[in-house]
Every structure is written in C-alpha cells, then in structure tokens.
Image (spheres, helix red, strand yellow):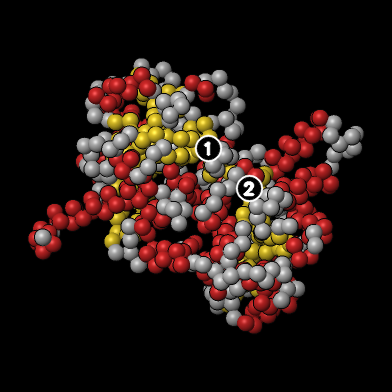
Amino acid sequence: MAKYIFVTGGVTSSLGKGIIAASLAKLLQARGLRVTIQKFDPYINVDPGTLNPYEHGECYVTEDGAETDLDLGHYERFLNIFTSQANNVTTGRIYQTVISKEREGAYLGKTVQVVPHITDEIKRRMLQLGQDGRYDIVITEIGGTVGDIESLPFVEAVRQLQWELPEEDSLVVHLTLIPYLKAAKELKTKPTQHSVKMLSQEGVHPDIIVCRTEKPLFPELRRKIALFCNVKQEAVIEAADAATIYEVPLLMMREKLDIICLKKFNITDYKEPELSKWKEFLDKLKYPKSKVTIGLIGKYLELQDAYKSILEAFVHAGAVNECQVQVVNVHSEFITHDNVAEKLAGLDGLLVAPGFGHRGVEGKIVAVKYARENGLPFFGICLGMQMAAIEFARNVLGLKEAHSTEMDPDTKDPVIDLMEEQKKITAKGGTMRLGAYSCELKENSLASRIYGYSPISERHRHRWEFNNKYLEQFENAGMVASGKNPGTGLVEIIELPKHPFFIGVQYHPELKSTVENPQPIFVGFIKAAKEYAEKKANVKNPLLQSEMI
C-alpha cells in the first residue's frame, strides 16, 4: 500500500509549499522510491483554465490535456515524470462531482452535506493515485493557508485520513514562516506557534514543521519550536532562502527531511540518493562561462508567475549552454515603430510569449518585424508564432490588413483563424485544443536539426491556428511550414531559413522542459543568442577578433 504525505501551509501564502513538496519528492525518488505529487486547490473554479494570469499565474497543461495549477510544472520539472488530470483537484471539481451524483440519486435520499459527502470525495481523490500499485509514496499539497475558510474541508479530510490510515502510512508536513525583525535583530517563532495551534484545533497534528527563514535557525530556537508545537526537535526543518529553487532538494537533504519521513513510514529498504545529474546541472547553473540577454515580450509581465514555465525553461537551456540567461521584460503595449530599436537595444534574442486578447498585439508585431529585419534570434510561442505570421503577411506578402480573427473578426486576410472544430463551441472552460499532439518535421529544416527526430509530441493550448489558405503564398515568399500535425495538416512550426534563427511554434514547448531533459528549441535558441552576442562583441572589439583568429 502507498504511503501518504500531506503538505500544508500557514502564516502566509507563497511560502513555497510546491517547491518543498517537489524537493522532498525528488529526494525520495533519488533513493529509489516511486513518487508522485498532487495539488488540491481551494478555489471554486473547476480548473484554472479560465483564470486571468494576474489572478493565479500561468495555467499549466498536462500531457493528457488537463488545465492545472502552475505547481504541477514544478512537480514535472523536478521529478522528470508526467502528471495528469488526477494530480490537480479543486473545490469546484469536488462539488461538481458530488452535485452530479446527487442529481443521479447516488446518495439514496440522504441530505448531502460537507461532512461526510464532500470530505469523502476529497479523501477518495487523495487516495486515488496510491491505489493501483504504481507509487510507493503520494505527496498531496493542500493549497491556501491554514485558517482560510476555503481550506477547511481539505484539512478535515486530512484529519479523517490520519485517523483512518495506519499510523505508519501517513504524515503531515507543515510549512510556516519564521520572520526576522530587523529592528529587534531576532527571529520570531510566534507566527509558527499560532499556525500550528490553528492546525491542531482543526484536528490535524503536524509530524514535521518546515520553517522558511532568512536567517539560520540556531538549536535553541529549534528546541523552542519543537516544545511549543509538540514535535521532535529533529522534525523542525530549516528552509533557508536559496539562490535558486533547484538548490532546495540539497538543502532539504542536509536537513534530513527525507530520512525523517522514511523513519516515520518504517521504510528501511532505500539507497543513498543518486543526484549526480542534479548536482552537475547546479554546477553549470552557478558557474556559467558566458551570458546572454533575452527580451521576453508579453502582456502579463507584472507577475513573474504568469510566464513561470518559460523562465524555468531558460534556466535549463542556459545550464546546457553553460550560459547565464538574463531575461529582460519588454511590455508589448509600449512598443511602437518609433521606439522599437531603443526598446530592444542590447538584446541577444527575442521571445514573444503566449497570450489571449488584442491588448499589446501591435507592439508584438512591431517587435517581430525588428527581429526579422535585423537578424536578431527570434522565438515565438503560440500567440508569438501567430504574430510572426501576421507580420510576415503584412510586410512581406503585402497583405496590409492581415490579422487574426481573434482580434479582428472582420479582417479581409485572416492568416490566423479559429480552428474549424472550435467554431461551434460556446463554453470557455476546458474546450481549447489541449494536451499532447504529434507533429511531423520537414527534413533539413531548423526544427528537424533542433529536435533530431520526427515525429515529435508537444502540448497545446489554443483555439486559433494558421490559415492554410495562405500557406502557398507564405512558402513562395520564403517562410517555411517546417512542422505539421499529420492528421489535420495544422501548421505547428514556421521558420525563415535565410534568417540566423527565426522560429515560431503553435504549441507550448516550455511545458515539457525539465532539469534532466531541457527543451530542445530553448537550448537551440540560447545557443543562437550566444553566437549573436559573440558576433556583436567581435564587431565592437576587432582586436579581440584578430586574437581569436
């Protein structure tokens, strides 16, 4: 039978429950155990697919087409395994299931209540992944903060499972904050004490307390936390701020978080953690040999989590190239023909990010034109690829009114149009083209050189597509459709062979980039940016160039 770890949070949100859960899972996986992680979110949306990125960060899409919380991206990046629809559950999905059952008469005339019906459905889903023998340990992260009214049913479900499961089959990790008061020059444990007290009042007693802190936890402070929070002193774990999230597994290993869990579970048959690839990645990340500056053009730049997977894919690709990737945010709303050269000055590469709606679109088109005409390495993702097609149609093909029907339903030249199967759909939630689809690559293209194999499989999240009625015009003018879906003919990749590096993809390659398997296009893009930076340096310093020769 699988063992279950529940990760809760207190004091404040954004402490990093997802990173702690993923780090613990990585350590257990490195010791030879089969581990998965799931996230339970307390909001009433059925999934985050209809949420504005400003509300909840990016919407992460799994291989099977589930629109999920961004923490599932951390799980996949750390563990290098796929998650699925079953790994993310919201209050909305729980209530939707229970109400559907009630309408079907499944409760035999009983009054449907939060306890036991809602909590029973929560428990069923919490145990689901551990019941088919695939995993030794299932880690469940509970979203929100202890004390939130929305989280109460989830905490109650954990309480019931602590009572129902054998003592050695479950444990609770509680993440809290130990704030440092600069004026008093000391760390304060009171918020943690109150958080644990609140959790205990709801019937859940933590086995391990992980303390986010800016300063080291000295032994006396750990003893105090252990005494007042009713845990062993060894179960008070320091989670110090790290330079990168990828250091956290090693920090948790030093604190013996995984060993404490294994002892609680009475698991003795485990090996020393195999983390050689992870440490090699960290060495390259910490000690780069070069640096590039990439412009990220988007419309949700005020919130870093809106493009989380893209930023992490840059980290992975940078490490492969032994290169530090500095990402500069460029808000597309403020780019015009008059200032584009100034806005993009100093960049070694340009990535135009995904998005929805008309806001900032013209600025993206102007930026693509600059990259195309000036040989600046360009990478467009989803909407970014569509903007590249519109720019080419307007400025190369001479179709001055070319646009997407998403922004201009009455455009005379809809080079980007709504997918045929999307035209009759009215419901917004979960109805886009979602999940992994196959793509065949054109021989001798940039895409085929980047991947090295065909067909490929990448994840999608879109409604609009390249309009194949214009494909012949595009290819006659020099833009190649180097990747297509074999079943539908949907154009997945466009590129300019005469450009140093110009590629746009309809899918979201960032979603499959992990520490162990960095995404190939990101790796190729950073390599091209390095070469571009080196050429710029040689032009500015011809003496250096002669010395290199």
Mark 1 vs mark 2: which is more N-terminal? 2
Q: Which numbered tag is attached to residue 435?
A: 1
Q: Amino acid at mark 1?
A: Gly
Q: Which mark is residue 87?
A: 2
The picture places residue 464, in percent across and down from the top left corner, at: 45, 27
Who's the residue at 24% across and 36% down the image? 497
Q: Is residue 208 visible?
A: no
Q: For this view, does 374 lie left or right of residue 314?
A: left
- 393 or 150: nearer the eye? 393
- On the image, the x and y values in percent for residue 431 come to 57, 30
Residue at 39 percent across and 63 percent down: it is: 285
Q: Count residues near mark 1 (Cα–Cα under 10 Å), then give few for <14, some for 14-19, many for 20+.
A: some
* Quadrant housing the C terminus: bottom left
Separation (CA) of disc 1 from disc 2: 15 Å
Q: The residue tagged with tag 1: helix, strand or loop? A: strand
Q: Is residue 217 left or right of residue 384?
A: right
Indicate the quadrant containing the N terminus: top left, top right, bottom left or bottom right.
Answer: bottom right
